[in-house]
Image: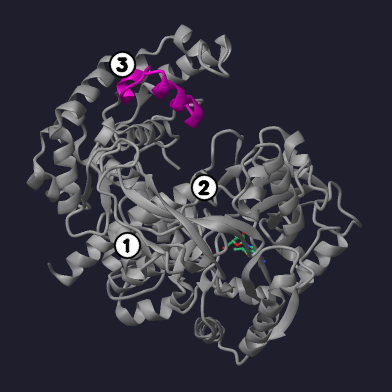
Amino acid sequence: MSASEAARQRVEALRREIEYHNFRYYVLDQPVISDAEYDALMAELQALEAAYPELVTPDSPTQRVGAPPAQAFAAVRHEAAMLSLDNAFTEQEVRDFDRRVRDRLEVETVEYTAEPKLDGLAVSLLYEHGRLALGATRGDGFVGEDVTANVKTIRAIPLRLRGSDWPERFEVRGEVFMPLEGFRKLNAWALEHGEKAFANPRNAAAGSLRQLDPGVTAKRPLEFYAYGVGFFPKQRLPETQAGLLACFKEWGLPVARELKVVSGVEGCLEYYRDLLARRPSLPFEADGVVYKVNRLAWQERLGYTARAPRWAIAHKFPPHEVTTVVEAVEVQVGRTGILTPVAKLKPVPVGGVVVSSATLHNFEEVKRKDVRVGDTVIVRRAGDVIPEVVKVIPEKRPLAARPVEPPTRCPVCGAEAVADPGGALIRCSGGLYCPAQLKAALKHFASRRALDIEGLGEKLIDQLLEKGLVKDVADLYSLRPEQLAELERMGAKSAQNLIQALEGSKSTTLARFLFALGIREVGEVTAQILAEHFGSLEKLMAADESELEQVPGIGPVVAKHIAAFFRQPHNLNVIERLRRAGVHWQTPQAEPRPLVGKTFVFTGALTAMTRDQAKARVEALGARVSESVSRATDYLVVGAAPGAKLDKARRLGVTIIDEQEFLTLLHQFEAPGRG
Ligand code: IVH
């Protein structure tokens, strides 16, 4: 395999993994890996895409901000996108950041603001005539959820601003979070009342703010710190970030007490070391420090990449670590049958959160780390998510410590456990006959991004399986209201609602249907690729492995899984019954993509549209948008006050077009009736 082919496959695998974790983190609020692991995946993908720019696609996780919003709240489009921050994990990375900033600005030293990076959730608050008009979550960065009613219950957020020198209309950006004390109390209360505790303050804040009943939110100890602006009239901006935050304070908007203006990178690092030393006594969970170029005019000159400002960076704290004892090792069964060892721990507080279990990832890892029941281990919790066992402390091993053997049978269904060829993974071979896998498959089938069957949650699925009412996903569509009404916590009304949701789910898209089937290695993106390429289920089902491998983006492993899936008589039977039950979709029509293979770069401000809109429009026509000019650039689009890219393009002889020519080009190719 050539190096670039290996890179392509790795890029695809990383994207799939990142997409999955985005889904867990942003949509479900139920992450399954630590920030540190996620950041590492993203860093690897970014590095690969930097080394192989031809692999960058508009749908890469590096090219966008987050995941789409959940459906329960009204959607709101942000006036200015809510971006993310790039991360630095080492002092060197912070020095590199400072160097890039100074190089671009061509200055000797830069003043920065430094403040804690709070672990909560970002919100945008719109103030009109000094009154809170709208509160929205970040969502995918462009469209968030209207949580105004909930935001209003947070006392730290003023409903009316103090003074009168604020702009008529502007957006405040900041973090809603739960201070540690409140978090501990809330969890203590939950446990006393037999409810599930929150994994960490971030999840508690997100879960509390995204309540359909604001009455519940009101009872949660949420707080808010402002750290920036979204839409804001330019002529009203002060000179500096610190000046802006000072205005906020005057207007009654809370700002982190720890905010400081520091000089140069040394000032940043000194601040970091100081806050890190004070971390154990901070009243909230901070997962790092954020540095921002203080001068707003300089922020504007530095601008943004696709996902983050160039004028700010998050310097992450190292993860929390403690020692505790492994009391048992349990085996969990995942959707595709993967058996995951989980260490049950003597409960121990880690960075303000009580931890009682930690993932061991897989049995290879158990062997490599030589984790035994009874061992004293170091456990790490990185900001959030499932804690992991880092290593064993061999000196503390008791004589009676018991080694952990990989299972030979699935702990749920008893089917044989088989090792993946060449891999560290062990799977239950029971397939959909294993109740654990079937349950996960049903959950996946009904999930929002699959067939989106509202109201079909975990508890209900449990009951349906226990009562034997469903044995596969197709059985869902033969459920009768009177059967449902008899289930626990289901009345005639909710039964009727579920039947309606099932009915509604029958009208779907081919991509969603393919994703819902839960074919191994077929995530949303792959499902989309397959749907677009084959256009119909029949054609896809008829394709053999080699035809599948021809599809751009489908590697040999994925091709094998797809072909194997459609060979299984059980799967064919389920598909047949789903279609007979009325599950259907429209045949997707391929849009012409006349700019495929062309690369665009933008410099300077456009007047008719934003940079993001321009980007979206050329990308929709198949083109790629790059941040920097190179010989591979086909067009440089020049707006007002262009930067250094213009000189470079001239030097390299790249075609340079102005906004008017760009618009003409768009009009020429876009389907009639568009923008
Ligand atoms: S500034 C344009 N400052 O971190 C980006 N973000 O990783 C503006 N966060 O979505 C972000 N504390 O939710 C900024 N002091 C702080 C922050 C902060 C926490 C969160 C925020 C953002 C995420 C990015």
- Find numbered disc 3 in the image and state the secondary structure of the residue it sits on: loop
Q: Quadrant of the N terminus?
A: bottom left
Please state which of residues 662 and 181 is positioned toward the viewer in this rendering: 181
Q: Which residue is mark 3?
A: 582
Residue 558 visible to the viewer: yes
- Which region shows up in magenta? 456-475
Residue 294 can be seen, yes or no: no
Q: Secondary structure at mark 1?
A: loop
Predominant SS of the magenta segment: helix
Report the residue at 70% width, 37% height from top: 193
Mark 2 or 3: the one toward you: 2
Question: How many residues crowd around disc 3 within 10 Å: few (fewer than 14), some, or many (20 or more)?
Answer: few
Three-letter residue code for mark 1: Val
Q: Is residue 440 left or right of residue 640?
A: left
Q: Which mark is residue 30?
A: 2
Q: In screen coordinates, is 20 left or right of 550?
A: right
Q: Is residue 340 magenta?
A: no
Q: Are marks 2 and 3 in contact (CB under 8 Å)?
A: no
Q: Amino acid at mark 2?
A: Gln
* Residue 668: x %, y % from top left: 33, 48
**Residue 646 percent across, percent down from the top left:** 42, 76
Q: Amino acid at mark 3?
A: Gly
Q: Residues within 10 Å of mark 2 (few under 14, many from 20)?
A: some
C-alpha span from label 2 to label 3:
32 Å
Please identify the quadrant where the C terminus is shown: top left
| C-alpha span from label 3 to label 1 | 38 Å
Please give the name of the residue rendered at 81% of the width and 58% of the height, measured from the top-left corner.
253
Nearer the observer, 623 or 607: 623
Choose the circle earlier in sequence order: 3 or 1.
Answer: 1
Residue 56's disc is 1
